[in-house]
Image: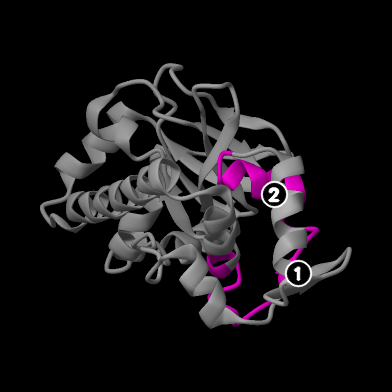
Amino acid sequence: MPHKNVDLSNLLKRVWHFRHLTASDLRTIISAGKIKRFKPDNFIFQTGDPAAGMFVLLSGKVYLCKTGAMGQEQIIATIVPVIMFNELTVIDGGPNPYTAIAAKNCITWNIDCQAFQELVRSYPDPEIGLGLLRVLASRTRLLIDRCDDLSSLPVMARTAKLLLELSSFGKKPIMRREYPIRDLAAHIASVPEVISRSLKQLKDEGLIDYDRKVITLLDIDQLKDLAQITPLPTFVP
């Protein structure tokens, strides 16, 4: 099925540290892994299970989640195409550090630890390995930021910060179909009832507006002050 390989090559070339590889090298990488599909709300892998390997999300949306001390689900990152995730397991072969859930219909490319390490050893160019380190560093910084939020910011501040992040600091509306209350709550380790009250208070104060379809940010400066933030770190593409 050569035409499928061509499509996959173009998609994988959008991953930052695959960008300089030749078409032949990309075909070799593709053949070392597998295409996997997941329906919405299906687990891609779960925390603590044996290494599922590295994934590259080709289409759809994935939530990376951890379970809090009180049993609540927290979304620690949202993955959109085209970017890798669960890369740690192909470095150390250890268990999955978090749970990945398909938020939409997803198509992924997946490679296990042994196959990936053989690929890295076969290429003298260190870009693949260095690219992994950049992704790990960026993800670690984001996780540290999330931990700081949970330990120091009240729910209202975390809600304001999340709205700023999801709207690219007010540059686009937040579609409620994409981010239902349950998912918003999971992003800040809270429950739907609490974030619903926070949204209502922000609306009453004139900082946001919303209906059943969309949330719109009205006062970015006030929301920034409330959230006590500078722009959030992002993953290296």
Does the segment drawn in magenta span residue 35?
no
The amino acid on which the numbered mark 2 sits, given as a three-letter code, is: Ile
The amino acid on which the numbered mark 1 sits, given as a three-letter code, is: Lys
User: Relative to residue 181, is residue 188 drawn left or right?
Assistant: left
Q: Is residue 49 above or below residue 122?
A: above
Q: Residue at x 39, y 28 (%)?
A: 97
The front one of 144 and 123 is 144
Comes first in the chain, label 2 or label 1 = 2
Image location (x, y in percent) of residue 124: 10, 52
The front one of 123 and 72 is 72
Label 1 Cα neighbours within 10 Å, binned few <14 / some 14-19 / many ≥20: some
Does the segment drawn in magenta span residue 184?
yes
**Residue farthest along the right direction in this orientation:** 212
Colour basis: one colour
**In the structure shown, which secondary structural element does the residue marked by tag 2 occupy?**
helix
The front one of 84 and 161 is 161
Magenta range is 164-189
Q: Which residue is mark 1?
A: 203
The front one of 220 and 88 is 220
Q: Residue at x 52, y 81 (%)?
A: 221
Residue 80 visible here = no
Residue 129 visible here = yes
Q: Quadrant of the C terminus?
A: bottom left
CA–CA distance in space, label 2 to label 1: 12 Å
Label 2 Cα neighbours within 10 Å, binned few <14 / some 14-19 / many ≥20: many
**In the structure shown, which secondary structural element does the residue marked by tag 1 occupy?**
helix
